[in-house]
Image (tube, rainbow, N blue to C red):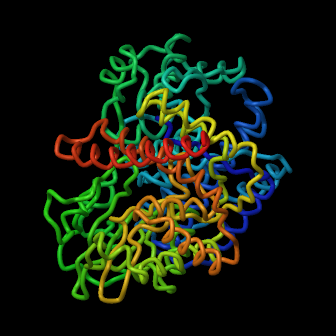
Amino acid sequence: MLIYGDPTRSVRADILCETIAARLRALEVRPPGLERHAALVGIFIKAGELVQGLSDFELETVGADELSARREKSGVLLLDLARLVAESWSRGFSGRLAPPDRVWPLLQELRAPLPLSIKEGEGYAFYALYPESYIEAARRSGLGANTVVIGIRSIGASLSAAVAAAIGAGAPVTVRPVGHPFRRKIHVGPQLSQRLLKDRTADFAIVDEGPGLSGSSFGGVADWLEANGVSESRIHFFPGHSGDLGPEASQDHRKRWAARPRQVVELDELVVAAGPSPRSLAAWVSELVGPLSRPLQEISGGGWRSMLPRSHESWPPADPRFERRKFLAHTADGPWLVKFAGIGDVGQRKLEKARLLAEAGFTPPVAGLCHGFLVQKWVAATQPGRSDVHRADFREHLGRYLAFRARRLPPPATHGASMATLCEMAITNTGEALGESVAAQLRPLLSKALQHDFPIMPVDTDNRLHRWEWLAGERGFLKADALDHCAAHDLVGSQDVAWDVAGAVVEFDLTPEEGAALQGIVSDGSSRAVDAELQEIFELCYLAFQLGLWTSAKTGAGSDEVPRLDAVAARYANLLLRRIEGYAGSMCR
C-alpha cells in the first residue's frame, strides 16, 4: 500500500544563514526561561537543516560524502549551537546565553546562493523527538571526547551534534544512506574515509531517529565501518526509541543491534516523569493554565477514546502510527488537551493556525505552546451521530469551515502529492486490496485526470474529516484535530480544497444534492469555484488512500483493534468498488 510521503522544500543557503543570524541576535535580548530555550532549539534545528542541505548538495555533485571546507564550517557552527542548547538545558533555562564569537563569521562564510533541498526532521515534527533526549543519553553513555560521532541525514545531522556536544567530542560527520529502503548503504569519499578511520582505538557513535521498518540506515553505516576494519565492539547506537529493529531488518543487522549498546532517553523519562523540575512537561503546562490538580493523564495511541461518552464496543478506530503524543492536564478550571505539535518552526506555525481557527469558532480555545506541546481546552462533547450530520446546519458549518481554510490558511512550504502521484497511489492500493481486475477498471477513469489541465490551487487542507473528528456540543460543532494532516508523514499533503469536499462527501455519506450544496457553500465562502470533475477524481483517490491507510494499520495492531480497522477498511473498499463500477458502467453507455 502506498500511504507514506517524503516531502522536501527548497531554500537558498544564504537565506537560511540570514534567518539563523537574525534569530540568534533576537535570542540575545530574550529573558531567560522556557520560551527562550525553545527558540534556541528552533535555531539549532534550522542550523541542522543548513548542514543537511549543504551536505546533500555536495553529495549530489560529488557522488559521495566527502570532506569540504563548506561541510567543515557548517559542522562547527552546528556544534557550537548544540553546546549552547546543552548549556541552556543543564541550567534549567536560566542565566545568560551568548553564542561563541566565531558563529558570526561562520554564518557569513556559508552565505552562498546555493539551492538546497531540505527534508523536515520527522521526529521533530511528528514523533516528539527532542535533541535534549540525545544530550542526556550521551551524558550517560560513558563515551569520551575521542569518540567519532556520525549523524545519519536528515535529522541525524542535528541529533549527532547534540551527542557530540554532550560528550565533548569534535564536530560530527554526517552521511546519507542511499538505495533500497530496506538495504541502505553509504558512499564515503577517500578523504572522509581517512578522517573517520584514522584513530584505530576510537569508539563510534551512530546517531539517527528510528529505527523504522528495517533499521537499514543504522545497519548500513555500521556495515561500512566493519568493512573498513572497525570492530563491532567499538560501535554504539543512538536511536530514537528503545525498541527492536522492524520486521524488514536483516538477520545480521538484528544480531548486531541486540549485541551493541543503544543509548536512549525517551520522552517519558526526559520530561513526562521528570518530577518537580523546570524541565518537566507538567511545569511547562502549569505556566500556561495554572497548577495541575493531578499528574498528566496519558491519552496517546487511541487512549483519548476512553474519554468519549460511548461504550468500548462503539469506539472509532485508531492508528497510532499517525497519532501525536497527547495528555490531559487537569486544573481547577477543567481539563486541557496537551498535544505534541512539533518543536521549532513547525510548532509555531501550528500555534498560529490553532489561534486563527479557534477565534473563528471552529476549534477549541488555545492556551499556548510550551516547547513543542500545544495546549487547548478539552471540550467534553459528543461526536455527531448519523442523524445529526445530515442536518443543513452541520453542512453549512462544514462548508464555512472548509471555505475559511481555503481563504485564510496558506499552504505548507512543502508541496502535496501531484495528480500523477495520487493516481498511481489509487491504482496501486486498489490493486492490492480489491484485485488487479478492479484496478484495471480504475486506470482509464484516472487517465483523464492526467490529461486534463485542472485549475488546482493547493491550500491548507484538513485531510482528516472523519466523523469521529467532530464534536457536537451546546455551542455547535467543533473540529477536534485540524492542524497538521496536510503536513503529516503521509503521501497526500496540501491539495486543492476539492480534496476536502471529496473527503466530506465520503465521510458523511452526502447525497449528490447535499454534495452540490456543500460545493456551493465552499465556493461562495472561499471565492474559488470547486471543480466538480476534479472532486470526482479526488473521491476515487481519497477512498483508495483511506483504504490503504486503514488496511495497513492492522500491522502491529492489538487484537481488540483489528475488528475496528477491518470494519472501516471494508467501508472504504465497498464505497470505492461501487464508485468504480458506477463510473465504468457510465463510460460504456
Residue 191 found in image quarter: top right
Q: Is residue 203 visible?
A: no
Residue drawn where x is 29% and y is 46% of the image: 565
Q: Is residue 538 left or right of residue 354?
A: right
Image coordinates of residue 537 in percent, x first then y, are 60, 51
Residue drawn where x is 26% and y is 70% of the image: 328
Image coordinates of residue 138 in percent, x first then y, are 41, 42
In front here: 269 or 32? 269
Q: Is residue 444 left or right of residue 430?
A: right
Residue drawn where x is 75% and y is 30% of the image: 60
Residue drawn where x is 51% and y is 43% of the image: 580
Q: Is residue 322 above or below residue 351?
A: above
Q: Is residue 250 left or right of residue 332?
A: right
Quadrant, the C terminus: top right
Q: Is residue 268 visible?
A: yes
Q: Residue furthest front?
A: 589
Q: Is residue 295 left or right of residue 256?
A: left
Image coordinates of residue 292 in percent, x first then y, are 23, 79
In front here: 552 or 102? 552
In front here: 126 or 469? 469
Q: Is residue 331 above or below residue 92?
A: below
Q: Residue furthest right?
A: 113
Image coordinates of residue 261 in percent, x first then y, are 34, 29
Count up the numbered dots: 0
